[in-house]
Image (cartoon, grey):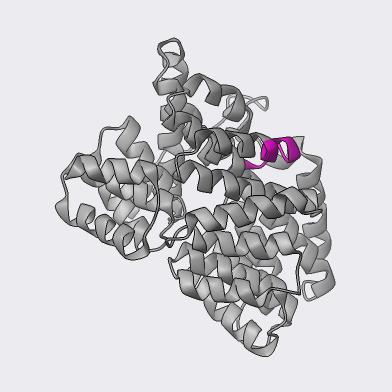
Amino acid sequence: MLALVAQAKPFVPASDDVVLERLPEMGDPALAELKRMRAALTANPRDLAAAVPVVRRALDAARALGDPRFLGQAQSALEPWWQGDDAPPVAMLLRATLKQSAHDFAGSLRDLDRLLAAHPQMAQARLTRATVLTVLGRYDDARGDCAALAGSVAPLVVIGCEAAPASLSGDARPAYDALTQTLAYSGADAAVREWALTLAAEIAARRNDSHAAEGHFRAALALDPRDPYLKAAYADFLLDRDRPRDVLPLVRDGTRNDMLLLRLALAEQRLPDSRDAFVAHRAELAARFDAARQRGDSMHRREEARFRLATGNDPSEALALARANWAVQREPADLRILVEAAQSARDAASLALAHDWMRRHHLEDAVLTAALGEAR
C-alpha cells in the first residue's frame, strides 16, 4: 500500500477555472431539492417523516441517472432503521426497496417476508416481493403474491403483476392478451399505464410480434419520454432489428446513465459516420466500469458483460461477468448475455444451463431460441 501511495501523484488544477466534476444537482431542480432535504434531515436524523421523502427522492434519482451514489444517500437517510426487525413498516419497506435496487435480493426478501408476515395486506410490499421473486426466476411464488393483490389495488396493477412472471413461464400469450385487454379498458393513472405498456412491449418483442411491440413502446414513451428503463428496452428492440440510427435520438440525451450510454455506443458502433463518437463513448464506458469495479459496485455486471463482448472482443471476461450476474438475477436479458458470451467463448456448460432453463420454464423468447438453435 505504501508503494502505491508513493507512486500516486495528486492532480493540482492549473487554475480555479478547471472543472473537476460536474455535480448532477447543479442542473436539476429536483436534485437540488434533494440536497436541501438531506441537509435538513441532518439536524434530526431520527425524524422518520423527514427521512421518508429523502429516501424516495434518492431512489428516483438513482433509477433515473443510474448513479449508485444516490443509493448511498438513501441508505444514509435510513441509517437509524437500517438494522433490526423492529423498524417501522414504512422504513422496512423502503429498506427492502433499496436493497432490491442495490441487487441485494436475498436481503430484500428477508425484509419483505418479515413485513408481510406482520402486515399481509400491505399491497406495495407484496408487489415489490412479486417483482423480486420474478427477477430471481421464482415464478410460481411471484404469481401467488400477484393473485393476493386482487381487490386491494387497481385491476391493471394485478394483471401487470401477474403478466410478468406468467410471460416467462409458459403463459406468454394469455398473459399478453389479459394485459392488453385490461389496458384497453383501464382508467389507471399515467405511471401505471406506462409500466404496463412497457411490459406489454417486452412480451410482444419476445414473442416476435414487432409491430405490436413498437406500438406499445411508442405509447409508453408518450406517457413518460424520460424513463431510462423504457428507453433502454426500446433501444434494445431497435438494435435487434438493425435500426441503430433510430437509437441515437432516443438515448443521446441520457448518457449520464450507463445503460443509455451503452446503447448509444452499441448503435454508433454499427454506423460508419459515428466512428469517432463510438471511440469516445467506448473509452468513457470503460472508465465508468473500471471506477465501479474499484468501488466494489457489482450492480452493472450485465451491462459490463455486454460491453466487454460487443466492444472489447473479450469473450472470456464477458462470460465471467455474465455467469456472476446470472448467479444473482435471472431475467431474459441476463440469460441472453450469458448465451451470447458462452457462444463466443465456446462454453458448452453455460449453453447447456441456458437450454435447461428455457426448457424447464417454457420460456418463449424468439431471439434466445434462435441463438440457442445456432449454438447446437
Is residue 162 rendered to the left or right of residue 303? Answer: right
User: Which quarter of the image is occupied by the N terminus?
Assistant: bottom left
Tell me which corner region of the image, top left, top right, bottom left or bottom right, holds residue 250. top right
**Which residue is at the front of the view, 127 or 319?**
127
Q: Horizontal and vertical percent for residue 227?
A: 66, 42
How many discs appear? Answer: 0
SS majority, magenta: helix
- Where, quadrant-wise, is the C terminus in this rendering? top left
**Is 342 left, or right, of 88 in this rendering?**
left
Name the spot of residue 171 as percent of width and height, x first.
Answer: 47, 60
Q: Is residue 281 visible?
A: no
- Viewer-side residue, 112 vs 206: 206
Residue drawn at 63 percent across, 25 percent down: 15
Looking at the rendering, the stretch of residues picked out in magenta corresponds to 219-228
Residue 334 appears in view:
yes
Q: Tell me the quarter of the picture where residue 126 sits.
A: bottom right
Residue nearest the observer in this picture, 134 or 188? 188
The answer to whether residue 357 is above or below residue 146 is above
Q: Residue at x 32, y 51 (%)?
A: 322
Residue 86: x percent and y percent?
67, 88
In the rendered view, does 292 fall on the left or right side of 360? right
Residue 155 falls inside the magenta stretch: no
Question: Percent x, y for residue 6?
Answer: 36, 45
Q: Image quarter for residue 251? A: top right
Q: Residue at x 40, y 48 (%)?
A: 365
Above or below 322: residue 124: below
Please name whichever residue, 122 or 274, is drawn nearer the observer in this view of the structure: 122
